[in-house]
Amino acid sequence: MKNAKTAVIACLSAFCTILAAAQDKPHGLLTDLLEHTDKTWGGGIEISGAPQNGQNVQYAEIASAHPSFSWIVPRDGTPAMQTAYRIILSDNREDAENGKGNIWDSETVNSKESVSVIYAGEALKPNTEYFWRVKTITDAGGESGWSDIKAFRTADRLEEYKTAHYPIVKTRESPAEIKKIGAETFFIDFGKASFGQLVITLDSEKDGAHAAVHLGEKAKDGRLDRKPGGSIRYQRHELELKKGRHTYRIEIPKDKRNTGANAVLMPDYIGEVLPFRYCEIENYAGNLAAEDIARESAHYPFDNSAAQFKCSNETLNQVWDMCKYSIKATSFAGIYVDGDRERIPYEADALINQLCHYGVDREYSMARRSHEYLLERPTWPTEWILQSLIIAWNDYMHTGDSRSLKANYETLKARTLMALREKNGLISTKTGLQTPEFSASIRFNGKIKDIVDWPHKGILGLDKNEGGETDGFVFEDYNSVVNAFHYEALKIMGQTAKTLGLEKDAAFYSREAKSFRKRFNNAFFDKENGRYADGAATRHASLHANMFPLAFGMADRKNVKSVAAFIKSRGMACSVYGAQFLMDALYDAGEAEYALSMLTKTDDRGWYNMIRAGSTITFEAWDGKYKPNQDWNHAWGAVPANIIPRKLMGVEPLEPGFSLVRIRPQTASLEWAKAVLPTIRGQIRMKIENKKGIYSLRVSIPPNMEADVYLPLPEGGGRLSVNGNHAKTLPSDGGPFAYAGRLPPGEHRLEMTAK
């Protein structure tokens, strides 16, 4: 026993030594936002070692002649701020190992930049393998050792800037459960649904025997549901067996709708996939063990350990787990699509997907690729055209890389929809301003239409008692929701122009945003009732007319309370898409308790309803009765995957690339919550306890990042301590919070005690 304990201690000591060594040098190296540039896949399966001759291999290709480099600054014992770096780039591993950059040596650069540092040597060559590494100097630990070497390959053709991306990969998964439910029938559960293919090994005493293989997403009464309804997937496959023991791959047929002209197609090396969790095998007299059956799940590379969340509310834990997994499972196409029914990218899906992906993984390339794909192939809703600017700005704030903004600047300008502005200063799609020239400027073939939310009343087989998801919104020539998005687009365009050094444009758009906000409030705010109307000529007020202006910061401070009260009176009168902006609006208005009740509600208009129905991936709609043709694999239903880190735990970037972050938790009545949240600079770790009048926050801020930290301020005030020292409760930027100050990297303990 003593020897065993000694061995365990020695093992832990060795592990800690390895971990410490890893932390003493830069790590998490990204080349053009990709971490796994040194991996190779064959048919989507990762290859260890050299590929075999003639093997069809896949790898990430860097397509920019001057890519960006990012890294996580080492802790050096005490987390610190970087003061300088040195990068070397070689065309052979030996030189890189010896600290020689035969292609480029940045030499020591006095800079705190550790994300999206642009390669400044001569343009890279196509079809070439390169090796780079970096060392840093910090204000606490001095000079670090060299990072591990990161290899990458360039594409056949290089451009000055082009977004890089991973190939689609496969993960081979065993069943969670196998049940024999009849003499020749097996029921197999893989635990969660995914987009994949089935590989099975079966025995047969003769040639020509037939087994039936059923695949699907939904179970009913302990069996696979063969009539699941809507767009929930089910397929039957007849399998002709050969004598002896053989392995069979079930060939998934192409669906005419989701492999059409506008769909994102699966690459040949992956093949067609089907979303399924369950499998039934009939007419098979042999035995079936776990090693005989596997699902090969297709997805974008994903780090399951990048993000974690647990709290005192088990419903919220289950919602988080489902939403986090949904982002991985729905990444099967390599571009954000709207689920399996169409497999078409839409801006609204992409925006929610983007924020959720940032919330659950340190991965930025899929969001950028999807955004730029949609800039070339926009979709029809007016608001979704405007959302391109929000997506573009999110990309910049999370990566610190402005190249996409610069490359697409003119397109983004057109998508502010200034060309649709009427004499009254508002924009409209219904007053004859959609000329061919306008359509060409936004790259859309046709005319765009206002959507507000989806679906609308009376379509897609909705029951006559179901009114759609717009809360009775009254569509007029001048639509408050569309104009709220226009304001947000103007605001972002001003920030974008400033980032790119275009001072004249920056001044113009900032001025336009400021004046438009006043114009919007004059046109749509109902002073008598303290809420926003749907249109300029109606007094009807919907949830949507109020949650969008509140989410975009358009309400005057004196009116925030009344607008929030109206929003709360409407409940969840929006779709799973609209819930993104509802939750943003509630948290930004300081309505954390009500927001928590929305996240954890268990009726048929909440996320838990998806779990109760048996899905492990988020729905396209709250329930089948609200969208009868809905699917069970729609990531725009995964809003909590970003709301929990961004709003409930309160972590959002204030400066590009997370150089400065705001940490403003709004955990409401949760007794405790803990999270690990990914950023491009490393993980932020948080633990919150809220008991007996003491609200405590333990937070670990990664190196080379600073944080403006706030704590909820109790009614009647409270006493604040930071790292054991009494601190003043400084004024916050609005809402019931106390500002604890700007904190440096490292471990911090904050407590707020009610008076």
Image (cartoon, grey):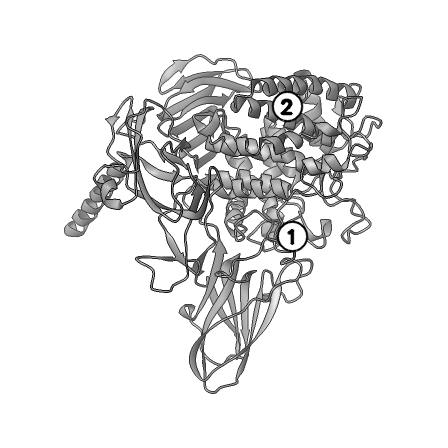
What residue do we see at 15% from left, 50% from top?
Answer: 2
Residues under numbered marks 1 and 2 in contact, where contact means CB atoms less than 8 Å apart: no
The answer to whether 239 is drawn above or below residue 257 in the figure is below
How many labels sit on residues? 2
Q: Is residue 140 visible?
A: yes
Given residues 705 and 468, the one toward you in this image is 705
Q: Position of residue 338 (x, y in %)?
A: 62, 49
Nearest to the observer: residue 753 or residue 88: 88
256, above or below 379, in the image: below
- Report if residue 601 is visible in the image: no
> Residue 630: x, y in percent?
68, 53
| Residue lying furthest bottom | 206
Q: Say which residue appears at 73% left-offset and 42% top-offset.
A: 469
Residue sitting at the far right: 537
Taking 491 as reference, is 131 above or below it? below
Element at label 2: loop
The residue lying toward the viewer, choosing from 631 and 136, is 136
Callout 2: 10 Å neighbours few (<14), some, many (20+)?
Answer: some
Left or right for 723, reference 13? right
Q: Position of residue 380 (x, y in %)?
A: 71, 42
Which numbered disc, 1 or 2, marks the residue that appears first in the sequence?
Answer: 1
The x and y percentages for residue 524 are: 77, 24
Q: Amino acid at mark 1?
A: Asn
As drawn, the label of residue 262 is 1
Residue type highlighted by circle 2:
Gly
Which numbered marker is on residue 74?
none
Q: Is residue 163 left or right of residue 414?
A: left
- Distance, label 1 to label 2, CA atoms, is 35 Å
Left or right for 624, reference 395: right
Q: Which mark is residue 553?
A: 2
Residue at image point 67% right, 40% down: 443
- In the picture shown, does residue 656 fall above or below 205? above
